[in-house]
Image (cartoon, helix red, strand yellow):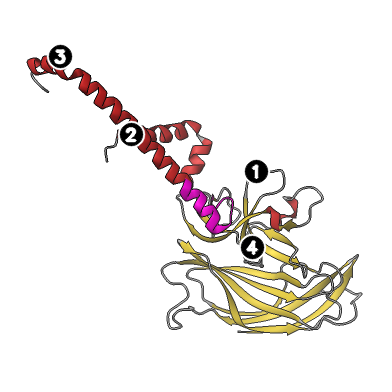
Amino acid sequence: VSPPWVAAMLSLDFLDDVRRMNKRQLYYQVLNFGMIVSSALMIWKGLMVVTGSESPIVVVLSGSMEPAFHRGDLLFLTNRIEDPIRVGEIVVFRIEGREIPIVHRVLKIHEKQNGDIKFLTKGDNNAVDDRGLYKRGQHWLEKKDVVGRARGFVPYIGIVTILMNDYPKFKYAVLFLLGLFVLVHRE
Amino acid sequence: LRKNVEDFTGPRERSDLGFVTFDITADILNGKNALRTIFDWNVKQLFLYLSAEYSTKNNALNQVVLWDKIMLRGDNPRLFLKDMKSKYFFFDDGNGLKGNRNVTLTLSWNVVPNAGILPLVTGSGHVSVPFPDTYETTKSY
């Protein structure tokens, strides 16, 4: 804390400079923030290209694949066309018209010569296959329903996403803190 | 890794339904180092499944899981199962099981780590099961 006479001097001579410098610094920090957001988006898009999946990382939402996966585990997916769908694989799929992705294992496949494939899935922890989950009249899943195949995973980390979904206030708090941190942080 | 099977088929409306009973004798080994157990520090469980693979007029490739089992870390990685019935109905998409001489049964497993990659491993040794040309009308299953 400077003595009062220094503050008085500062406020007289350097106020304009200081005000100008602060504005520039503020713009700089905003640009920094924008760059970080853009880089993050680019990395995400890059992942989408490399893995071939529209959602290369998903969070497990239910206990239907226990004890392998639990709610909150994070899955890494690929969806390359060159990789054929085979039984035993863990697929993440969406049922037409529904948003929530489901993570289950392939139980049966019937593939035609030209590559058209229809398959049935089942959660490891479920007693029956997924026919009950599909749309009415739908008996099989097709390639177009697949978001990706699970290739790797880390446990627990996705809990943050689930918390942010269930408690929106938590989401805003996290975003606010992140934004604040980036704006205030000096390189 | 060996399996022996016998089988019958029963017609169900439009699709063939196969019945298979099997024995499994298997030793699940660590792919990288046969002397160390498959259940190393990063293996949480193995998801084992017995699948039948075959070709039909309708479909170039069919794969059906007949049986599966979760083997947790700490379980014995050796299997001695006898006279097992399939866990899931072995329906074909059509009538491709009748007279099909080339239905191959393979044991595979999904290695689930504590964290990391999820590989699918196919066991060595598979058994070919020929299905008979006629249907069984009495279900002795």
**Number of the label disc, if any, that sits on residue A87:** none
User: Would you name the residue on which mark 1 appears?
Assistant: A99
Mark 1 residue type:
Glu
Label 4, label 3: how far apart the Cα atoms are: 69 Å
Left or right: A150 in relation to A136: left
SS under mark 4? loop
Q: Nearer the viewer, residue A186 or A97?
A: A186
Residue B41, x across and y down, in percent:
41, 68
What amino acid is labelled 3 in the image? Leu
In primary-sequence order, the first of circles 4 and 2 is 2
Q: Position of residue A15 (x, y in %)?
A: 19, 18
Label 4 Cα crowd, 10 Å radius (few <14 / some 14-19 / many 20+)? few
Which region shows up in magenta?
Answer: A42-58
Q: Quadrant of residue B136?
A: bottom right
Q: Nearer the viewer, mark 4 or mark 2?
A: 2
Instruction: Give the quadrant of the N terminus of chain B.
Output: bottom right
Mark 4 belongs to which amino acid? Ile
Asked which secondary structure carries label 1, the reply is loop
Q: Give coordinates of residue A90: x percent, y percent.
A: 60, 61
The verdict on a common chain for dots 4 and 3 is yes
Position of B27 relative to B92 (above/below): below
What residue is pinned by disc 4? A81
Residue at horizontal 77%, vertical 70%? A113
Q: Could you tell me if residue A130 is visible in this image?
A: yes
- Mark 4 near mark 3, Cβ–Cβ under 8 Å? no
Q: Which residue is mark 3?
A: A12
In the rendered structure, which disc, 3 or 2, sits on the residue that comes first in sequence?
A: 3
Secondary structure of residue under mark 3: helix
Residue under numbered circle 2: A29
Q: Residue B128 versus residue B60: which sits nearer the camera?
A: B60
